[in-house]
Amino acid sequence: MQPTVTEFLFSAQGRLSRSQFWLKWALPYIVVTIALFFILSAILEPVPAAVIFSIYLLVALWPSIAIYIKRAHDRGRSGWFVLLLVVPIVNIWALIELLFLPGTSSTNAYGT
């Protein structure tokens, strides 16, 4: 069963496959972020553009965390694993694991 948009963006429960992560979150997020940056830079002065862009990033913070937690769950890891993303050097390993490695193929503690 596919999660609703609200569950997908705001719930840290369950699992999220690599394909779902890339196609439903990462690529759209990257495209929107780059487009917003260029649009704001073109139509506004630097300070208001930076304020609006910062607000956008803050609004996207919780969905990003929730989605990374679900990716950690898909790898069979606790959501606390995501905290490694803020540790220099170690974050490279965490990013590789969350972004590129497949999830567990069988049921784990976080679902099917």
Image (cartoon, grey):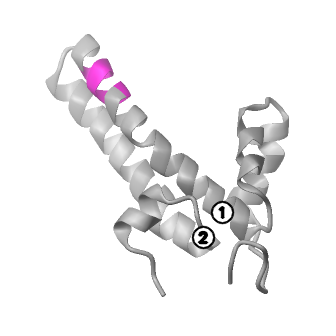
Q: Which residue is identified by label 2?
A: 16
Q: Main secondary structure of the magenta part?
A: helix
Which kind of residue does numbered mark 1 sit on?
Answer: Arg
Residue at (40% x, 58% y) in the render:
28
The answer to whether residue 81 is left or right of residue 112 is: right
Residue 3 x %, y %? 44, 76
106 over 21 or under it: above or below: below
Are there few (<14), some (14-19), or many (20+) residues within 10 Å of tag 2?
Answer: many
- In the figure, residue 91 lies in which quadrant? top right
Q: Which label is found at residue 71? A: 1
- The residue type indicated by label 2 comes to Leu
Residue 47 percent location from the top left of the image: 27, 12
SS state under label 2 = loop
Q: Earlier in the sequence, mark 1 or mark 2?
A: 2
Magenta region includes residue 50: yes
The vertical placement of 52 against 22, above or below, is above
Residues rendered magenta in the picture = 49-54
Name the element at disc 1. helix
The residue located at (41%, 35%) in the rendering is 57
**Relative to 42, 101 lies left or right:** right
- The quadrant holding residue 89 is top right
Q: Position of residue 1 (x, y in %)?
A: 48, 87
Residue positioned most to the left: 43
State which quarter of the image contains the C terminus: bottom right
Residue drawn at 55 percent across, 53 percent down: 66
Q: Are the residues tagged 1 and 2 within 8 Å (C-beta)? A: yes
Please tell me which residue lies in front, 63 or 12: 12
Residue ID at (43%, 66%)? 7
Residue 35, horizontal then vertical, whole percent: 30, 43
Mark 1 is surrounded, within 10 Å at the Cα level, by few (under 14), some (14 to 19) or many (20 or more) other residues, namely many
